Image (cartoon, grey):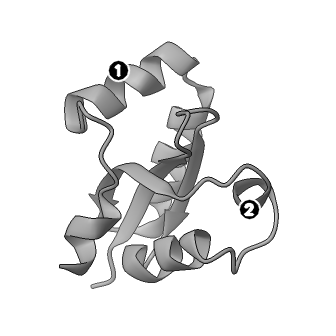
């Protein structure tokens, strides 16, 4: 069974926040970190993975992504800080 990930990226200033989904978190974050994907994340240097959660199917992932996108900034920050209080780049742990 294929799992999907909902993730949040930011930059060094923690502004802005980007929410996305993928079926391969390591490869997707690598693409963001190396500016291989054009658009919003490249334009704002969003390369720091500060939050992610795993879901068992695509429908759950897209539903959760849409839910998080509707939250206000404070709600997203609270979610990140519960999961990752120091806003560390979690990509390092995925590749170690």
Q: Which mark is nearer the camera, 2 or 1?
A: 2
**Is residue 42 visible from the viewing direction of this image?**
yes
Q: Nearer the viewer, residue 70 or 34?
A: 34
Q: Is residue 42 left or right of residue 83?
A: right
Return the mark for residue 78.
1
Counting from the top left corner in percent of width and height, residue 41 is at 70, 57
Q: Residue at x 25, y 72 (%)?
A: 94
Give the residue furthest to the front.
12
List x then y, in percent, for residue 63.
Answer: 51, 47
- The image shows residue 9 at horizontal and vertical percentages of 51, 50
Q: Is residue 10 above or below residue 86?
A: below
Q: Dot 1: few (<14), some (14–19), or many (≥20) neighbours within 10 Å?
A: few
Residue toward you, 58 or 51? 51
Q: Residue at x 80, y 70 (%)?
A: 38
Where does the C terminus fall, quadrant-wise? bottom left
Number of marks in the image? 2
* Whether residue 60 is visible: no
* Quarter of the rendering containing residue 34: bottom right
Query: Mark 2 or 1 closer to N-term?
Result: 2
| Residue plotted at (38% across, 78% down) | 26
The crowding category of the residue bearing disc 2, from other C-alpha atoms within 10 Å (few below 14, some 14 to 19, many at least 20), is some
Q: Is residue 70 left or right of residue 8?
A: right
Q: Secondary structure at mark 2?
A: helix
Residue receiving disc 2: 42
Image quadrant containing the N terminus: bottom left
In the image, residue 66 sits, relative to residue 60, either above or below, namely above
In the visual, does 59 lie left or right of 35? left
Q: Give how far apart the Cα atoms at labels 2 and 1 are.
A: 25 Å
Residue 85 in the image: x percent, y percent? 23, 30
Are the residues tagged 2 and 1 within 8 Å (C-beta)? no
| Up/down of 86 relative to 88, above or below | above
């Amino acid at each position: 069974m294929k799992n999907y990930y909902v993730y949040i990226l930011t930059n060094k200033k923690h502004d802005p926040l980007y929410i996305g989904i993928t079926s391969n978190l390591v490869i997707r974050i690598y693409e963001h970190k190396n500016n291989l994907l054009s658009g919003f994340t490249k334009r704002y240097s969003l390369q720091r993975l500060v939050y992610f959660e795993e879901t068992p199917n695509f429908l759950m992932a897209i539903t959760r992504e849409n839910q998080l996108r509707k939250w206000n900034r404070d709600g997203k920050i609270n979610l990140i800080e519960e999961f990752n209080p120091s806003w560390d780049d979690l990509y390092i742990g995925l590749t170690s």
